[in-house]
Amino acid sequence: MNREAIYIHHVIMCNCTAYFIYDFVMEWVYGILDLVTAVHHAAVFGLGIYYFWNPYGGDEYLMTLFLGELANPCLIMRTILKSMKMTTSKVFTWVEAMFASSFLLIRVIVAPFWMEMVLAAENCPFECKFGLALVFAISMSWNTKILGIFFKRYREILGDPPYIISA
């Protein structure tokens, strides 16, 4: 962290940028691209291009991508099960719970500490910090959506929580 980017940073950044272009196009083609996701993809794509030409910020960018995409296997599996109309299956319930748990753990608990380190990095340019903070802010908006899904599912499975009645 806080060092010049090396060759492998650029290779990984190019692959990540290609993935975000692919993901953006596929979501657009299938009609599931919303404004928040479009801004997220545009920010990551822009950061990828910026980092490719910038000598600093490689570690910060790649670790942010790693943390941000760590919950994706569960998200992709959830999407596949949803497209197969298996939303009432136990497998879907477990995959959704794993996705919500991993996403919230990473983005609510781990990511704020990481962002604090990024913002304190002396050699990381302002544009990089701003872009990463934008991506982080977008993921914060997803947290509320995912919490909503999580609690809806909780109620479907366990029913409404018991209410405490005091005298």
Image (cartoon, grey):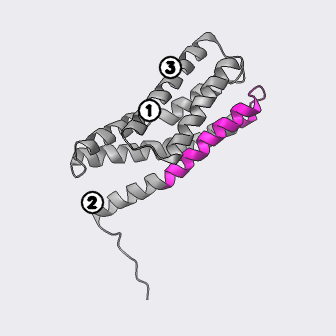
The reply to whether residue 117 is in sight is no
127 falls in the magenta region: yes
Residue 121 figure quarter: top right
> Sequence-wise, which precedes: disc 3 or disc 2?
3
Badge 2 crowding class, 10 Å Cα cut-off, few under 14, some 14 to 19, many 20 or more, is: few
- Look at the image and give the residue range highlighted in magenta: 119-144
Residue ID for mark 3: 15
Q: How far apart are marks 3 and 1 (CA)?
A: 15 Å
Image spot of residue 42 (x, y percent): 57, 35
Circles 3 and 2, Cβ within 8 Å, touching? The answer is no
Dominant SS in magenta = helix
Helix, strand or loop under label 1: helix
Q: Is residue 115 left or right of residue 42?
A: right
Kind of residue at disc 3: Asn
- Front disc: 2 or 1: 1
- Which callout, 3 or 1, points to the residue nearer the camera? 1
* Amino acid type, label 2: Ile
Q: Position of residue 159 (x, y in %)?
A: 29, 67
Find the residue positioned furthest to the right.
Answer: 122
**Residue wearing tag 1:** 25
Q: Earlier in the sequence, mark 3 or mark 1?
A: 3
| Vertical side of 62 occupied by 34: above or below | below
Q: Earlier in the sequence, mark 2 or mark 1?
A: 1
Mark on residue 157? 2
As displayed, is residue 57 above or below residue 126?
above
**Residue drawn at (53%, 46%) of the image:** 36
Residue at 78% from the left image edge and 29% from the top image edge: 122
What is the distance, in whole Å, between disc 3 and disc 2 at their CAs? 40 Å
Would you call the spot at circle 1 few (<14 residues within 10 Å), some (14-19), or many (20 or more)?
some
**Which SS class for mark 2?**
helix
Residue 18 lies in the magenta-colored region: no
